[in-house]
Amino acid sequence: MLNRFRIQRAAACALALTLFSLGASAQRIARSRSAEPALAVEASARFFPLAEGNSWTYNLDRLGPEEGVTVSVGAPVEMHGVAYFPVRGFAGDEVLLRADANGRVLEYLADEGREALLYDFSLPVGGTWAPRTADGCTGPATVAARNEPESTQAGAFRETVTIEYAPGACADAGVGEEVFAAGIGLVRRTETMIAGPRSMRLARARVGGRTIESAGLSFSVKIDRPRYVHGADGAAATLRTTVTAENSSDVPLTLAFPSPQLFDLSIRNEKGETVYTWSANKLFPAVVTEISLGRRVLETEIPLEISGRPLPDGLYTLEAWMTQPQGQLFSGSVPFTIASGGTE
């Protein structure tokens, strides 16, 4: 009797444990299924990231790689209690856009006081909609594919949405196809024009504070403006510069320096005379320094003065380089002017 009781008790415990496990599994499945739409909405909204400061630069293959177009997002504005982002360069004139919680991008039509659907990234393959276009030359849109690999100068993208457009009312104009990448935005557009077909391909982008561009080895010099004006009280203007050396390729690069100083800067006037050297008032120990170059940045402010007096008006050149013993293998320069009066 005792053994039979133990067996029955063990069986009851096993059954209870099984039911508990099945219930927990069902809860996990239910949670997973309920989370899917939210994840899909979040992902679809990322195909056109709308945030102040985002920008995209495209090459136009019909006009050559030196020609291109830049799309930028400005500070949000409120219309009837709803926030929209002004987007310049995307569809000719500035447009007011917002992304809703359903993965759609809507345009505010100020003249009509209403919204119009521009994109619906939440639709499955085969889903269609009638986008609002300024010229009326683009027909209905269809989600033609998802996750088709796309490569441009800015990189390779795998999480994509391909949108195809039917012909519109114009025989020689209209968008044919667009490809959007998650977290990036539009990476390619093909359209028909009177002069023939044209493609826009993403060259570089600034999205969410990060820069998207092709991998490689680079050295760059940037200043905050091309023209400087000294203060009316006699105070010298200040130049702000950013010098960047970067190896974003998959090939390691090791550099050696005679000291921990990696960069140096100088300013030359129109006669070629050096009027400023960044390292002139700095000391570095004579210790050989080796680095594996990833991304190295020097940001500094330079008072535009000499011996306590503002530099005279004229054309100047800021030069920057890495201090390798082999010479200025990494170097760059940018011109600027100093002018009296007026505004900077």
Image: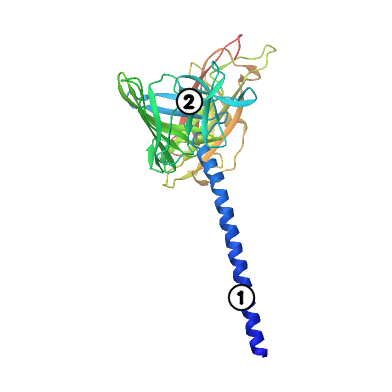
Q: Is residue 5 left or right of residue 41?
A: right
Q: Where residue 278 appears, x then y in whole percent?
A: 58, 29
Up the image or down, 242 lies above or below 308; here it is below
For the residue pair 288 and 148, the one nearer the viewer reads as 148
Please state which amino acid type lies under the numbered disc 1.
Answer: Ala
Q: Which residue is mark 2?
A: 71
The residue sitting at 60% across, 20% down in the picture is 304
Q: Earlier in the sequence, mark 1 or mark 2?
A: 1
Up the image or down, 50 lies above or below 157; here it is above
**Residue 215 appears in the figure:** no
User: Is mark 1 in CB contact (under 8 Å) with mark 2?
Assistant: no
Query: In whole angstroms, how far apart are the C-alphas of marks 1 and 2?
Result: 63 Å
Q: Where residue 260 appears, x then y in whole percent?
A: 56, 42
Quadrant in which the C terminus is drawn: top right
Q: Where residue 281 appears, x then y in whole percent?
A: 62, 31
Q: Which residue is mark 1?
A: 14
For the residue pair 272 and 189, the one nearer the viewer reads as 189
Please state which amino acid type lies under the numbered disc 2.
Answer: Val
The secondary element bearing badge 2 is classed as: strand
